[in-house]
Image: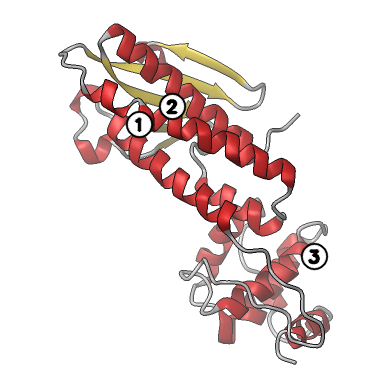
Amino acid sequence: MKKNIILKLNDEVILFTKNIKWDISENKKHTYLIASNKPFFNFDKLLTFFIENELTNFTENQLNILLKNCNIFLSLNKEYNAIKTTKNGFTVHYIAEKNIKEYKGSFGDCKKLVWNTGKSLMDLNEDEFLRTYKIKNISIYCYNYFTLSLTIEKLVKLISDILTKEPQQIETNKPDKVKENIFKEIFSNGLGFTLFFELHNIYKNKINKQANYSFLFYALSEEYLVCNGTDFVNFLSKFEIDIDKIDSRQSGTNAKTSLFNSTLKRYLK
């Protein structure tokens, strides 16, 4: 069974918590390399999950468990920082998403498996070290305790924002409420994002995604987008919509226009 993004993030936090506890017990400091064919600490996916789904009692409980585990990790900060040692090393995890198995190995195993930067790991400078390397379908994520703490603090803030967000009030005989524009690099305003979201909820389950999302790009372009076609295609991948390009044949008025106009009208009445 495929895990939702909350459970996946929880697994990732628990993985590092176990590693940090081991470091403290062994009086060592490690850098962690994650080789995975799926994004690690995927905050965008958590955000879009709650754009597409209501916060239920079940998901709220899951978020609270995740928040608790994040705080456990952060609480180890004092003990970990107190370690005074020259015994620094690397811990490698190869996360195989297809069969949900984790392989833990040495740096040598990881180098043979996926590392292909043209440099040895020890020769990388800080910027290169923190960069994600893509080899075929594998990405390598590098974390030390400092970068992990910043990442998990960011996750704590995002969870807190989701849990404290006021539910939208439904009002009759008034325009539907426009969503906050959380993708300002894509949409010019909240109405643009709201129109995308409304049509996306219809198009995501239909077969011809290339035609539908290309039409949506052109329909939004004049007033509601601040990005180009390539950026829009990349943005769609956040919602697990994969199209090759924008199809120019979908520009202008066609059979999809009436649905777009009727959706727009709900927010302008």
Query: Which residue is found at the position 73% from the left and 49% from the top?
Result: 56
Kind of residue at disc 3: Ile
Query: Which residue is found at the position 21% from the left and 31% from the top?
Result: 124
Kind of residue at disc 2: Ile
Q: Earlier in the sequence, mark 2 or mark 1?
A: 2
Residue 142: image tag: 1
Whole-angstrom CA distance, mark 2 to mark 3, is: 36 Å
**Image quadrant in which you'd find residue 248:** bottom right
Q: Which residue is mark 3?
A: 202
**Does dot 1 land on a helix, a strand or a loop?**
strand
Mark 3: few/some/many CA within 10 Å (<14, 14-19, 20+): few
Q: Is the C-beta separation of discs 2 and 1 under 8 Å? A: yes
Mark 2: few/some/many CA within 10 Å (<14, 14-19, 20+): many
Q: Is the C-beta separation of discs 2 and 3 under 8 Å? A: no
Q: Which residue is mark 2?
A: 34
Up-down: is 44 above or below 197? Answer: above
Up-down: is 110 above or below 175? Answer: above
**Does dot 2 land on a helix, a strand or a loop?**
strand
Up-down: is 129 above or below 91? Answer: below
